[in-house]
């Protein structure tokens, strides 16, 4: 998650350099039980899942991710973050 955040365009290049020090992550990475968030608004959100598999579709040159959502692992509607269930 930290690597994804640093490689995104959510922070400027100058701000990203500061994150190379480990202590800069304090308060930015939050384990909230059913999910992890990285960064202020906007942020990255990752959900805990089970049965994660990754298959390679060689014909289409794609990686196919499949998982099972853990019951109750979703944001509350009033938080207004997008929730996509595949």
Image (cartoon, grey):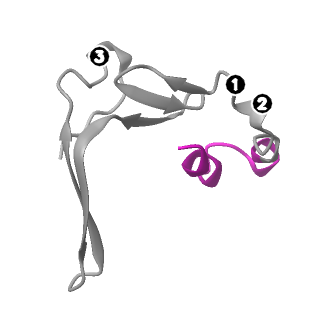
Q: CA distance from mark 1 to mark 2?
A: 6 Å
Local packing at callout 1 (Cα closer than 10 Å; few below 14, some 14-19, many 20+) is few
* Residue at far top of view: 78
Residue at figure coordinates x 33%, y 34% from the top left: 48
Q: Position of residue 42 (x, y in %)?
A: 54, 33
Foreground pick, 20 / 82: 20
Q: Residue at x 27, y 38 (%)?
A: 49
Q: Secondary structure at mark 3?
A: loop
Q: Earlier in the sequence, mark 1 or mark 3?
A: 1
Mark 1–mark 2 CB contact (< 8 Å): yes
For the point 81% across and 47% down, the residue is 17
Tell me if residue 36 comes above or below residue 27 in the rendering: below
Left/right placement of residue 2 relative to residue 53 reads right
Residue matched to label 2:
23
The label shown at residue 76 is 3
Q: Nearer the viewer, residue 11 or 20?
A: 20
The numbered disc on residue 26 is 1
Q: Residue at x 65, y 49 (%)?
A: 6
Q: Is residue 13 above or below residue 76?
A: below
- Left or right, residue 80 beside residue 43: left
Is 13 on the left-hand or right-hand side of 1? right
Q: Which residues are magenta?
A: 1-16
Q: Is residue 5 magenta?
A: yes
**Callout 2 crowding tier (Cα within 10 Å): few <14, some 14–19, many ≥20:** few
Residue 78: image x %, image y %? Answer: 32, 13
| SS class, disc 2 | helix
Which label sits in the foreground, 1 or 3?
Answer: 1
Mark in the foreground, 3 or 2: 2
Mark 3 or mark 2, which has the lower sequence index?
A: 2
Percent position (x, y) of residue 79?
37, 17
Distance in Å between CA atoms under marks 1 and 3: 24 Å
């Amino acid at each position: 998650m930290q690597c994804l955040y640093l490689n995104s365009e959510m922070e400027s290049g100058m701000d990203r350099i500061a994150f190379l020090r480990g202590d800069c992550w304090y308060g930015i990475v939050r384990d909230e039980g059913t999910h992890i968030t990285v960064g202020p608004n906007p942020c990255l959100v990752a959900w805990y899942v089970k049965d994660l598999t990754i298959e390679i579709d060689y014909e289409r040159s794609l990686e196919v991710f499949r998982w099972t959502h853990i019951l109750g692992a979703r944001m509350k509607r009033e938080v207004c973050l997008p929730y996509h269930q595949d």
